[in-house]
Amino acid sequence: MNNLLTLNLHDDELDEIFRKAAGDYQIDFEPKDWDNMNNKLNQMEETDKIPRAVMADKFIDVANEFTKTEPKERISAAFMFAAARYNAFEAFSKSANLIRDKDDAISWYTREYKRMLEANMDDLLRANSQQK
C-alpha cells in the first residue's frame, strides 16, 4: 500500500513565506490583520520551537498507520476535517469577534492551504521527474 511520502525537499521560499506568516497572536483581529498574518508568523519559527516539518511528519506518520486499515481517500478527508476543526479553534481563540472576522479568516486559511497544496504537488512532481 502506498504511503504519503515525507519529502526531504526543502523549499526556502515557502519556509520564508511561512516565517513571515507567524507572528504574535492578537486578541482582537481586524480584517487587515488576516492578510498581515504572513508578516507575523516568523516569531513562531524560532530555533527552540519544534520545526513545522517535524510536526507535519508526525501527523503523516499517524496517517500512514491508518493506511493499514483505511483507504487513503478516507484518511485525507479526516486530515482535512481535523485541520479545519483546529483552524476554526485557532481563529476563534484569536478573534474577539469571529462573526465579524469569519470571512477574512476563511479567506486567509483558504489561500494558505492552496499555496501549501500547490507547493507540495510541485515538490512531488519534481521528485517524480528526478526519479525517471
Image: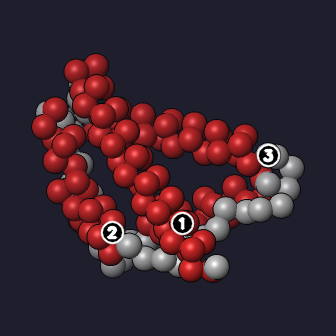
Give the vertical position of 86 relative to 49 (above or below): above
Of mark 1 and mark 2, the one earlier in the sequence is 2
Q: CA distance from mark 3 to mark 1?
A: 22 Å
In this rendering, position of residue 7 left or right of residue 95:
right
Q: Position of residue 83 (x, y in %)?
A: 51, 43
Displayed quadrant of residue 33:
top left
**Which residue is label 1 attached to?**
125
Q: CA distance from mark 3 to mark 2?
A: 31 Å
Q: Position of residue 113 (x, y in %)?
A: 41, 46
> Residue at (46%, 52%) from the top-left corner?
117
In this rendering, position of residue 95 left or right of residue 80:
left
Of mark 3 and mark 2, the one earlier in the sequence is 2
Q: CA distance from mark 1 to mark 2?
A: 19 Å
Residue 73 visible (yes or no): yes
Residue 54 visible (yes or no): no
Of mark 3 and mark 1, the one earlier in the sequence is 3
**Which residue is label 2 attached to?**
15
* Residue furthest out toward the right: 69
For discs 3 and 1, the disc positioned in front in the rendered view: 1
> Residue at (24%, 27%) from the top-left corner?
101
The kind of residue tagged 2 is Asp
The kind of residue tagged 1 is Leu
Residue nearest the observer in this picture, 70 or 96: 70
Q: Residues within 10 Å of mark 2 (few under 14, many from 20)?
A: some
Displayed quadrant of residue 59:
bottom right
* SS for dot 2: helix
> Residue at (34%, 36%) from the top-left corner?
91
Displayed quadrant of residue 130:
bottom right
Give the vertical position of 93 relative to 12 (above or below): above
The kind of residue tagged 3 is Pro
**Which residue is label 3 attached to?**
71
